[in-house]
Amino acid sequence: MARSRTIGLLGGMSWESTALYYRLLNTGMQRELGGHHNARSLLLTLDYGDLDTMASAGDWDGIAAALIDAARRVEGGGADFLMITAITGHAVAERVEAALSIPLLHAADVAGEKLRAEGYRRVGLLGTRFTMSMDFFTARLRGRHGLEILVPEENDREAIHRIIIDELTLGRVEPASQARVLEIAARLQAAGAEALLLACTELPLLLPTERYSLPTYDVVKLHAEAAIAWAIR
């Protein structure tokens, strides 16, 4: 009888992207194991409204405390490793991992390994304002994986953040926002980006990767594929 490790998931950041993770993990595991198999998982969903309020106020200690409490509950439930189903949540990933005895599958490492394996060195990155402006994700891509990371100018960063928070986390996909993000991606390509990383769990809801003018990688898909490999290896 096929048996895989249990994947621990911290969700609700937003629930829209968590639902995408859940679907990718289960369809991917069924594809790997066949039959009626799916991913063995434990999901604890946080309230995104609370976390968004803390992030807007710069209360990263509060976010860390909330995620650590949730992660310990998931670990106690029997998870073999942990995933944070939000890139902005990775701002406190190292603190969460330090509080656990199980490993954390970090999305930046998954993405960095893939991009280096594909031969890319200069990569454009799109995400929330926090992911593009703070160094918790970009520094890991640079320091551990040797990538040069390009991010949009400030006004473009603010536009993408608004699209993510005010539209995508609420399930809205607007044609004007699709066009704006494609324009921003084209500017990164003109600045020298060889590939594009969608470093936000909501951005894949806006456009398929094939719509972009340069090779584009979906961090949710990469993260889910790596989790499946961890679970069955």
Image (tube, grey):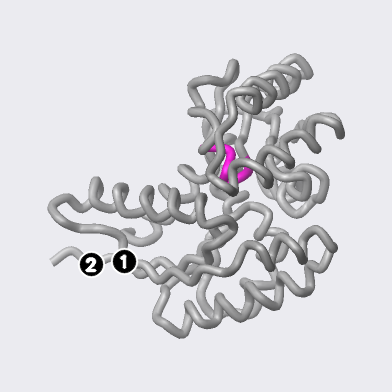
Q: Which residues are magenta?
A: 199-204
> Would residue 29 appear left or right of 67 to someone viewing this image?
left
Q: Is residue 70 above or below residue 22?
A: below
Label of residue 186 in the image: none
Secondary structure of the magenta portion, mostly? loop
Kindly identify which residue carries mark 2. Answer: 3
Secondary structure of the residue carrying tag 1 is loop
Residue 103 lies in magenta, yes or no? no
Kindly identify which residue carries mark 1. Answer: 40
State the residue in front, 190 or 14: 14
Residue 200 lies in magenta, yes or no? yes
State the residue in front, 110 or 19: 19
Q: Position of residue 72 (x, y in %)?
A: 55, 81
Q: Position of residue 142 (x, y in %)?
A: 74, 43
- Whichever of callouts 2 and 1 sits on the residue coming sooner in the sequence is 2
On-image quarter of the C terminus: bottom left
Q: Residue at x 59, y 58 (%)?
A: 13
Alpha-carbon neighbours of circle 2 within 10 Å: few (<14), some, or many (≥20)? few
Q: Are marks 2 and 1 in contact (CB under 8 Å)?
A: yes
Q: Amino acid at mark 1?
A: Arg
Q: Residue at x 40, y 71 (%)?
A: 42
Secondary structure of the residue carrying tag 2 is loop
Q: Amino acid at mark 2?
A: Arg
Q: Position of residue 151 (x, y in %)?
A: 77, 33
Q: Is residue 58 above or below residue 17?
A: below
